[in-house]
Amino acid sequence: MSYIAPAGTPVRLGEIAGALTGASAAAEASVCSALGRVSSLPAIWTISSGRAAMTTILQAMRAARGDDRRDEVIVPAYTCYSVPAAIQRAGLKPRLCDIDEATLGMDPAVLERRNFSRTLAVVSANLYGLPNDLERIEAICETNGVYLLDDAAQALGATLNGRAVGAFGDAGLYSFDKGKIISTMQGGAIACRQLRLASELDALISALPGSAAVEMSANFLRLVVYAVFLRPALYGVVRRLPFTGLGHTRYEPRYPITRLSGFQCGVAARLLNRLAELNASRRARAREFRDALTGMPGLQMVLPLPTAEAAYARFPIRVTEPETRDRVLASLDRAGIGATASYPLALADVPEVSAQVPAPERDCPVARRIAQTIVTLPTHGYCKPDTARRVRAVLAECLR
Ligand SMILES: *Cc1c(COP(=O)(O)O)cnc(C)c1O
């Protein structure tokens, strides 16, 4: 049965073939200049993943700051588990800040009241491509003399008040993983505004090993499989096989930190060429979901801030009653629509994280409520204009 994957990028086989034969140095330069245009930041590097980007940025921040007592990094209490894993990998400690129901990002009113004496950096989330309240978060970081790392792993191409997400604060990151705005299977990039930090980053990244030839071949094969099997007619056949792994996330502090292969740079460069088109189609699907689902009993919309242009890696909605969520997901699944419960736990309830966090910070009621009620809908290029209408029909039946 035809099945719409929960997330993904429709990579074209021609783009993979072109990347295989193209010059890799030129591809890397092309990715950096495209991301320079998107972010309006002067310094860009590619790297093996978003997690690798986060660990490397934090290491650069630590070196630039030069104060070993500052070993804490404040993160939203609801975000990708890779974020605290990357912090641990950098030898630092995650600290949690509860989130705001409106943006699903850190609540600035909660952040403002923190003691920043041990803080090295604050990390944003911009989940599903919805910009956080970045202007206020940035101002709080400036006032308190701590770095802001703007995590745009899911928000490539999103803006707030005309400024690119990923370009707030001191440094930002993008991810090219399987479920992000563009995908090279794995991959990421760093953007930096600050000179001192940029020179630390440059030193760290120049010292990274290249991607091994076996890794590159494996990545090529995985990308071909991904590009072919993301099509709904085939995804329906393979989606129960373990290797697909779309829409799952685990806490894993061990991962390679290398440069991005020339082949992956080539794929990223080609996808970045059509970033505007990819995001326009995601936004069109989001508008259709919003029109179709607003006001339905049992559901709540999560709307972008008024000055935000979201990128919509996925379209988030919330069920008003947590006990209805499993039913909603199961009904959409039967209808061939890959909806997910996103990250199933607030970070305070992820055992590897809670073990590192002092008890008072584990009290994050909003993050827990979001973890229990969120549902994400797919927005990628294999969704059709009628997907929203189908979702509405399924939900009307199941929430009756
Ligand atoms: C995916 C993601 C990351 C990590 O990126 P990878 O490329 O998967 O390592 C970091 N932060 C957020 C918010 C993410 O969604």
Image: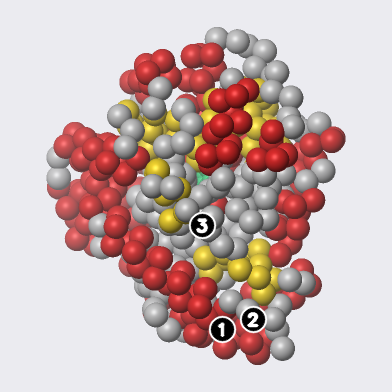
Q: Residues within 10 Å of mark 2 (few under 14, many from 20)?
A: few
Rendered image quadrant of residue 396: bottom right
Depth order, front residue of 272/18:
272
Label annotation for residue 392 = 1
Q: Is residue 399 above or below residue 369?
A: below
Depth order, front residue of 140/224:
140
Q: Amino acid at mark 2?
A: Met
C-alpha span from label 2 to label 1: 9 Å
User: Mark 2 highlights which residue?
Assistant: 296
SS state under label 1: helix
Please identify, in this view, whether the residue under mark 2 or under mark 1 is nearer the observer: 2
Q: Residues within 10 Å of mark 3 (few under 14, many from 20)?
A: few
Q: Residue at x 37, y 51 (%)?
A: 157
Q: Is residue 96 above or below residue 57?
A: below
Depth order, front residue of 77/170:
170
Q: Amino acid at mark 1?
A: Arg
Label annotation for residue 306 = 3
C-alpha span from label 1 to label 3: 25 Å
**358 displayed left or right of 292:** right
